[in-house]
Image (cartoon, rainbow, N blue to C red):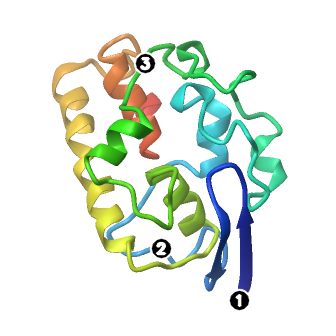
Amino acid sequence: MKKVFVKDSFQNKYEYVRTKKAGQNFHHDFKPQLTPKEMLTIGVFGGLYFSDKPTEFPPTWFKKAKLSPDGKKHKELNFYGVNAGQSLVQWQNKGWIHHDDTRGWFQWYCRYYLGRRHDDDGRQIKRWQAINRHAQQIINNCRTGDQNCRPRQRQTLLHWAYDSRKM
């Protein structure tokens, strides 16, 4: 068990406990295809997510990460070079942000990946499962390996740890 104290530009005086080993003991219904480090390296969220390199996460996650140099979203930093997804403000307005994970789903996933288990896990896993509809649309409408088919949906899947590059 490891206690983590968070103090960054989004949270101050938040703490949690990691009770599992990193990358292990996931819920049986949660099988992400990409690690947080892989996601940051291939290009997600327009480079905006974690451009401040929060210290609660391993520094190795940021070594080859495609991060915004100016704190703004840059679609060219995304793997598919397109904008995909909604803004944090839109997520907040829809009530999708839990007060413990103020940056949203990816922050929850990073903490889950590193071993935190939380009362919001069930909801977040259900949200992750629901994104599979985008994978089904790619499978049903694109030739396997055609990376130019449905790039916004492919980018969205990358944001949710589905490896759309293999579809």
Q: Give the labeled residue for mark 1.
A: 1
Mark 2 secondary-structure assignment: loop
Residue 115 place in picture, x, y as percent: 61, 75
Question: Would you say residue 32 is visible in this rendering?
Answer: yes
Indicate left or right for 23 with 150 as reference.
Answer: right
Q: Alpha-carbon neighbours of circle 2 within 10 Å: few (<14), some, or many (≥20)? A: some
Q: Do the residues labelled 2 and 1 touch (CB within 8 Å)?
A: no
Q: Alpha-carbon neighbours of circle 1 within 10 Å: few (<14), some, or many (≥20)? A: few
Question: Would you say residue 167 is visible in this rendering?
Answer: no
Name the amino acid type tagged 1: Met
Residue lying farthest to the front in this orientation = 12
Question: Residue drawn 20% across and 41% down?
Answer: 133
Residue 118 place in picture, x, y as percent: 46, 78
Q: Give the labeled residue for mark 3.
A: 83
Q: Give the labeled residue for mark 2.
A: 26
Vertical arrangement, residue 122 with respect to residue 95, above or below: below
